[in-house]
Amino acid sequence: MNMAFIRKGAVKERKVPEFENLSAPEDLVKLAEEKGVNTNPINVSELAQVLGVLVRFEPLPDDTSGSLVKDKRSGSWIMTVNSLHHPHRQRFTIAHEIAHRICHAANSDSFEDKTFFRNGESNWMEAEANQFAATLLMPESEFVSYIDNISSKVEDLAKHFQVSSMAVRIRAKVLGYEGHNL
């Protein structure tokens, strides 16, 4: 019996056709503003609905933050968020799943996301979805303005943007800030 091996090329990212104009978090903020969705901080649950994603909150295992799955019959996208997690973590999960819908749905029709920052296992889609989510939830100009004009305390930033302290610290590092208070 002969076996042939075919060399696969590098994975090429394909854009989701209906979201070609929404490739950056800033594009989603603009869409949210146009649709009357609150953007300070952004209401990611409403934004998901604007994008045609059904959001459900259900108890999931603690290491599972959420999932995004395309229903094979209807073709609609269903996001499930761990209802047992803190609301700030849920917001990050929703933003992360929105990133999968916008950026990766042409590559896959099912995403299950384990704890985002704590596990070392990640691939390019997960890393990209984390970065996208952080930028959507904590836009650079608003983040910098808050630090310059209101407070540089991690806890204050986390409360304002409704995200975890860990998410604030990672976003701050990406934006070039150092130290316990920024």
Image (spheres, rainbow, N blue to C red):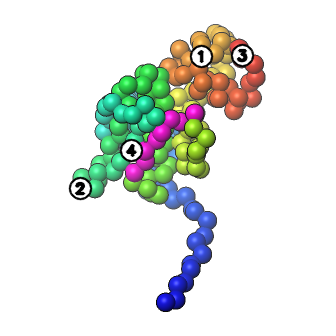
State the SS at label 1.
helix
Residue 43 rendering spot, x and y as whole percentages:
42, 26
Nearer to us in this view, 50 or 125:
125
The residue at which mark 3 appears reads as: 180
Please tell me which of labels 1 and 4 falls first in the chain.
4
Q: Which residues are magenta?
A: 110-118
Amino acid beneath label 1 = Leu
Please tell me which of labels 3 and 4 falls first in the chain.
4
| Number of the front mark, 1 or 4 | 4
Residue 29 magenta-drawn?
no
State the SS at label 2.
loop
Amino acid beneath label 4 = Leu
Nearer to us in this view, 166 or 5:
5
Q: CA distance from mark 2 to mark 3?
A: 49 Å
Q: CA distance from mark 1 to mark 4?
A: 28 Å
Q: CA distance from mark 3 to mark 4?
A: 34 Å
Mark number displayed over residue 73: 2
Please tell me which of labels 1 and 3 falls first in the chain.
1
Amino acid beneath label 3 = His
Whether label 4 touches label 2, CB < 8 Å? no
